[in-house]
Every structure is written in C-alpha cells, then in structure tokens.
Amino acid sequence: MGLNLIPSDLRQKYTFGEWHHACAVLASDFPEEFQDIMDCLQAFTLKKSAIMTPGGGRSPIPLEIDGFLSKRGWAEKAFKVEISVDDSLIPIPTHHIDNFKNRVGVEVEWNNKTEFYDRDLNNFRLLKELRVLSVGVVITRLSEL
C-alpha cells in the first residue's frame, strides 16, 4: 500500500518519502486531510519568480501552500506541553506546526537548514508520543533545485 495511494500524476510531479506507513494511515484514517494535501499539491505550480525571491521571511512558496490549506480549515498550531514533577510544572517547548487539522500536521520548509529539519522531526515525534499528532508531513524541495 503506502505511496501507491498517492495519485500517479502527483508521483510523477513530486518525490515522496514515507515512514511508518504514514500514507496508509493518512488516507484511511484521515481521508479529508489526505485529499486536502493531494489537492494542494495538484494545484501548486512552482514558479521561477518564487524560486528567485531573496531569503528573509516566508517565501511565496510556503505562503501559497499555507494559503491553500487555510481555505480548507487548516491553521497554524502551537502546543503548550508541561510535565509535572513533584507538583512543579516543567515546560517542554515545542515548535509550532505551520498547518494543523484533526491530528495531522503539515510543515512547509522550502529553504530549510538541517537544524530546522531536526527540530520539525523532533517536534513531530514528541507530539506523536503525546498522542496529539497522528501524521506529520514535511513539504520541502530537493537539494538539486
């Protein structure tokens, strides 16, 4: 199963990776969110002007993806996580998720650095262990681009 759940035209247009049966979980347990992501990728067009936009702040690419998903009810989400030890609360910082809906998170990291990938993956891992995130998706570019 897995990646074959993604429409073949999208598999020809993009490179997909999968861990822990994420596509199967997303498609079967979260069909609306799966369809939102597929529709977003289908509608997205990579423009040279967006690639050439200088750094600093969010580029047009994540703004376009985030904008599409927000029209479908996705929103940025921050989680307040604390652990209680002997009646003392210890905050556990988590990074916000760019797009969150019904236990599915989508991070858009277009011009990302390795430390940000690590941060996003660790954030997804922690939130999955805390049972508030079921599937995490990272949309990024290949280094060849």
Image (cartoon, rainbow, N blue to C red):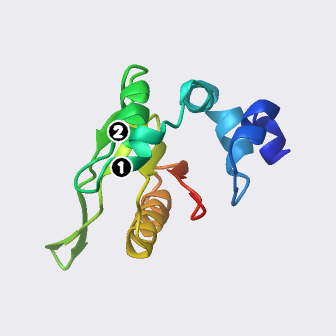
Q: Residues within 10 Å of mark 1 (few under 14, many from 20)?
A: many
Q: Is 16 left, or right, of 43 in this rendering?
A: right
Q: Residues within 10 Å of mark 2 (few under 14, many from 20)?
A: some
Task: Identify which amino acid the numbered label 1 is placed on.
Answer: Ile
Quadrant of the rendered image containing residue 113: bottom left
* Image x and y of residue 35, in percent: 62, 26
Residue pictured at 59% horizontal, 59% vertical:
142
Q: Secondary structure at mark 1?
A: strand
Disc 2 from disc 1: Cα separation: 18 Å
Q: Which residue is mark 1?
A: 97
Say how many tags the image has.
Answer: 2
Residue pictured at 28% horizontal, 47% vertical:
58
Front label number (2 vs 1) = 2
Q: Looking at the rendering, in which quadrant would you find the N terminus?
A: top right
Quadrant of the rendered image containing residue 12: top right
Q: Looking at the rendering, in which quadrant would you find the C terminus?
A: bottom right
Residue pictured at 76% horizontal, 41% vertical:
11
Residue pictured at 43% horizontal, 28% vertical:
69
Q: Which residue is mark 2?
A: 60
Closer to the camera, 19 or 84?
19
Q: Is 102 left, or right, of 38 in this rendering?
A: left
